[in-house]
């Protein structure tokens, strides 16, 4: 199931470019990781066992990555 979720999320990541902080929260919920410094912000979300990591510049998504869960 996690592999299917990873494939789905990975295929969508380019569509998140340009999203703002509020769109991310509405879609993924509260971030698990937040690191902010000046105009840059990094957010991490746990989505279906995968990690969605986004980099925002001036409040807008500049890049996104999806990481599959580690094998147990």
Image: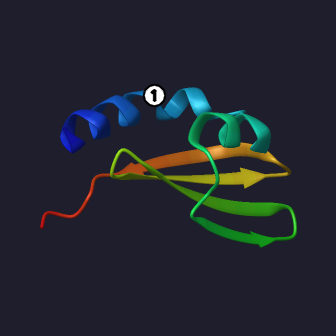
Residue 3 locus on image (x, y percent):
20, 41
Q: From what the image shows, is residue 47 above or below residue 26?
A: below
Q: Nearer the viewer, residue 2 or 19?
A: 2
Residue 60 locus on image (x, y percent):
77, 43
Residue 17 locus on image (x, y percent):
64, 34
Q: Residues within 10 Å of mark 1 (few under 14, many from 20)?
A: few
In the rendered view, does 29 fall on the left or right side of 1? right
Tag 1's secondary structure? Answer: helix
Q: From what the image shows, is residue 12 above or below residue 72?
A: above
Residue 22 locus on image (x, y percent):
78, 39
* Residue with the mark numbered 1: 12
In the rendered view, does 8 fall on the left or right side of 29? left
The quarter of the displayed image where residue 2 is located:
top left
In the rendered view, does 56 fall on the left or right side of 12? right
Q: Quadrant of the N terminus?
A: top left
Residue at left 87%, top 69%?
38
Q: Nearer the viewer, residue 42 or 24?
A: 24
Q: Quadrant of the C terminus?
A: bottom left
In the rendered view, does 32 fall on the left or right side of 5? right
Looking at the picture, the colour scheme in use is: rainbow
């Amino acid at each position: 199931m996690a592999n299917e979720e990873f494939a789905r999320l990975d295929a969508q990541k380019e569509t998140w470019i340009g999203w703002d902080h509020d769109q991310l929260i509405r879609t993924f919920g509260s971030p698990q990781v937040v690191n902010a410094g000046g105009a840059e912000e990094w957010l991490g979300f746990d989505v279906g066992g995968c990690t969605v990591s986004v980099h925002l510049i001036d409040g807008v998504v500049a890049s996104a990555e999806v990481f599959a869960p580690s094998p147990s």
